[in-house]
Amino acid sequence: MKNKILISLATSFLLFGCGGGTSSVSKPSKDIVASGVGTILVVEGMKKDVKLRSDRENARFEFVDKANVPSGTELSRYTGILTFRALNGVGNTEDVLVRAVDDSGWKSENLTLVFKTVSSDGVAQRSYIKTSVDDNSAGLERNFVKTDDGYVKDPFGNVWENNITGKLAEPKMYLLSELRCEILHQMNKNSNWRVPTADELLNLIDYDKEFGANMLNDTFEDTNLTSWAKPEGENQLIFSPLSGLLFNSEILDKYPVRCVNAPENKTDHVVSTDRFTDITYDFSTSLMWSPISQDKYSIESNASQYCAGYNQPNGEWRLPNINEVRSIVENGFVSYSIIGPNTIMPSSTLLNNNDANARGSHYVLLADGKTSKVAVSYSDTLYSITCVKKIEN
């Protein structure tokens, strides 16, 4: 029986709720899923964790043929985390065959995972947007510009509908919203108009603006319209510019949509972990991440001091901002070398709200093995944390 993964925000400390890959030689069955699509890229000399899932509640995982398992490859049978260690040889590819088995003897179709060893020098760069001019992040400046035809272009090159009030004054179901974006595409076959993803919508948020008012960039004329986001798995999502958060909804609920014309320039996300220090390197964004702390810290008191004192290697470790935390997500989950499933990953981005609780609040990422959501939590809550810094050349 298929289990629906739900993210539950504990009211005792959360204010608001929201909301590697594989290349199959043989098509995987619906009962075993490996995260992502395509060849899994691992930087030479490092390791890569890949999360396997099965809809069979009691399934365990195993290698199909242990004799052909590459050296250093490990499989956690019951959590389904496959660790591949890339030793030497840039350009080498390795195939790993796995399957899921339950106690009744059921076996899924075999799933082939293809690992390719790459050099860090040739990794295509991805980007994330700065949350504030004062957060010392190395991301993109928040340069939103209005185009000659009245649309808004974001720092990634995505073109957005600007004034949508007149077009969508009447409510729309999600399916009708999908249709309306497709009509825009049909009107210009060279375009790629579609319903935006949750991640694309979250990039529009200006965290310096007051929570509960309007957090979209000021370039947009229409700012207060809650709109549809592309569904993630079984989650139907709507986006609120009043909070910068995503919420679960029903597919027949009535909301408008802000269509996006997104260029087809997607690049592979190359995240690998040092085999000796367990520091994770995101070569696509040039950020490095410390392993999750064993002790817990609060954002308002000693979390920053912990990062400042982190010494593997020395220098300039700090708490990540919310857009940096979002950047480490791969196909719905944070690298398992940093945190495991069902984990809250705090950020340094504070909630800007004059009416907020006196305890203070900040943005966090809720991550499990299938999806991730941005939420808000109290600053005095204790967390296991991870720190970030630029990769040193």
Image (spheres, rainbow, N blue to C red):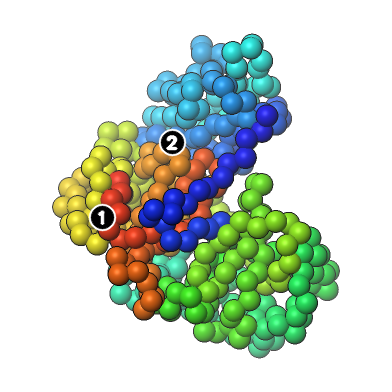
Nearer-the-camera pick, 63 or 3: 3
Residue picked out by circle 1: 298
User: Looking at the image, which is closer to me, 226 or 81?
Assistant: 226
**Residue plotted at (65% across, 58% down):** 249
In the picture shown, does residue 290 fall above or below 32?
A: below
Which of the 4 image quadrants contains residue 321? bottom left
Q: Residues within 10 Å of mark 1 (few under 14, many from 20)?
A: some
Residue at left offset 35%, top offset 65%? 361
**Label 2 element class:** strand
Q: Where residue 338 sits in the image (x, y, percent)?
A: 37, 42
Query: Toward which corner of the image does residue 168 lie, by quadrant?
Result: bottom right
Identify which residue, 243 or 59, lies in the foreground.
243
Residue type at mark 1: give it.
Ser
Q: Position of residue 61 (x, y in %)?
A: 54, 21
Which residue is tagged 2?
A: 48
Q: Mark 1 or mark 2, which has the lower sequence index?
A: 2
Tally of numbered tags: 2
- Cα–Cα gap, marks 1 and 2: 30 Å
Q: Position of residue 131 (x, y in %)?
A: 40, 70
